Amino acid sequence: MEYLDLAPIRRVAGTVRLPGSKSITNRMLLLAALAEGATVLRDVLDADDTRVMVGALRALGVRVDIEGAQTLRVHGVGTAVSPFTFSVKQADLFLGNAGTALRPLTAVLALSDGDYRVSGVPRMHERPIGDLVEALAQLGARIEYTATPGYPPLRIRPAAPSAQSRVSVRGNVSSQFLTALLLAAPLTGRAVTIAVEGGLISRPYIEITLNAMRRFGVEVKGEGDIFAVPASRYRSPGEIRVEGDASAASYFLAAGAISGLHGGGPVRVAGVGRDSIQGDVQFADTLRAMGARIDIGENWIEASAGEAAQRAGGLKAFDADFNHIPDAAMTAAVCALFANGPSTLRNIGSWRVKETDRIAAMAAELRKLGAQVETGADWLRITPPAALRAATIDTYGDHRIAMCFALAALGGVAVRINDPECVAKTFPEYFDVLAAITEH
């Protein structure tokens, strides 16, 4: 499908059951593969990014069985006498544009005894990985850049012996570098201390990693920017249920708040709630600060417009730091179209190295809808128009741009989404789910 035309949306209301979290699914898949014993994973996300992880694990000799809808049984390759070993010692792994697959797998393969090549789509070859490679080299990894230094594709050879017990990695480009090191560190068979340099962005994603490792029997002690990984092995917990995707929840919660300005809503998302381990549930706090009414339960969140926002006919403008929730921040940028003044998103420099340069892309598409937009190296300021304009939105192959800009139709204008199938990366049914709660 080249494009999808969305008619103006009069209101939305209802309940959405979220797909499984991509971040959690890919971490659990990898840890289950490395663990001793078999693990049943329930409510896993079935989308492009998780399929490439499953495909890579199978290519490495890991048995992954489908046991029902959104249920997989992963037979781990870890043993009681050695941390792990893959039965396939040579493989070419294509990992699309899935950073949650390519970066952790690079770290794991770098500490293995095989000869592997790792690659992705052209955009993945523009996303930096040099900081991770340098950190892995401190642990004895032998990784070669086969095209541009500092970027995939990579060739990974059997690791050289190393007794290094302390490594450092930059944390201000991508939290996935630290996640990859944390996940791989137990494979060394010794205690490893990881020091983060330059500050750490997207810290909530590290909490997801630490939680996942804990479920598989490895307790990491973190103090500030120092993480101590004990000499330990991964062991299967038997069964794990994957949380709903908190990043995906942001689109529907925002829809409930925006629609509520004119009598719509509420919208409830089921699958995340007050006990979620995902940082993106904090997007609900952003909406609350903008004047939305937020109700939250153990495994659900509901959004509508607060009384003051309804009376004003608009959400409150904001000036906020989004370092902790960079993915959900994109939804906040579209919410700014419905605010009562200019809104500023700060500390979003990581957008530059995502599926596309998200600062440049978001600015270009927001302008099409009539907004005035200013940008900097790590910030974006949006002044909403008096009335939105109908627009054709280019998505740059970026699933989150497609999903968040669909919300513009709540402004009473038609919106065309080019390349809508890019949402298959994390949420293949997104537009159908949105349509199910929509009234035109």
Image (cartoon, rainbow, N blue to C red):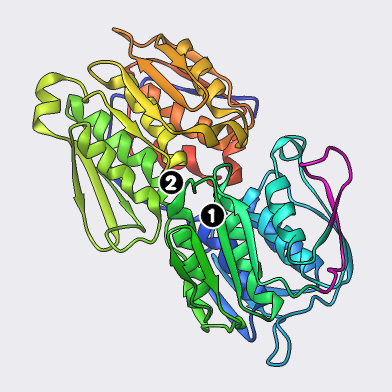
Image quadrant assignment for residue 304: top left
The image quadrant of residue 178 is bottom right
Which residue is disc 2 drawn over? Answer: 247
Q: Amino acid at mark 1?
A: Lys
Picture residue at 41% right of the left edge, 53% below the top: 18
Residue 389 in the figure: left or right of residue 25: left
Look at 38% across and 15% down and name the residue there: 413
**Residue 144 locus on image (x, y percent):** 87, 51
Of residues 243 and 267, the one nearer the viewer is 243
Q: Quadrant of residue 52?
A: bottom right
Q: Which residues are magenta?
A: 143-161
Which SS type dominates the magenta stretch? Answer: loop
Give the image location of residue 96, x and y in percent. Answer: 73, 46
Identify residue for label 1: 22
**Residue plotted at (80% across, 71% down):** 112
Question: At which x and y percent is residue 110?
Answer: 78, 64
For disc 2, the neighbor class at 10 Å (few under 14, some 14 to 19, many from 20) is many
* Extreme-bottom residue of the structure: 81
Up the image or down, 68 lies above or below 282; here it is: below
Check the image and report above or below for 414 versus 230. Answer: above
Label 1's element?
helix
Which amino acid does the dot numbered 2 rest on?
A: Ser
Tag 2–tag 1 contact (CB < 8 Å): yes
User: Is residue 262 depicted above or below 253 in this figure?
Assistant: above
Disc 1 crowd rating (10 Å Cα; few below 14, some 14-19, many 20+) is many
Reply yes or no: does residue 147 show up in magenta.
yes
Q: Nearer the viewer, residue 204 or 22?
A: 204
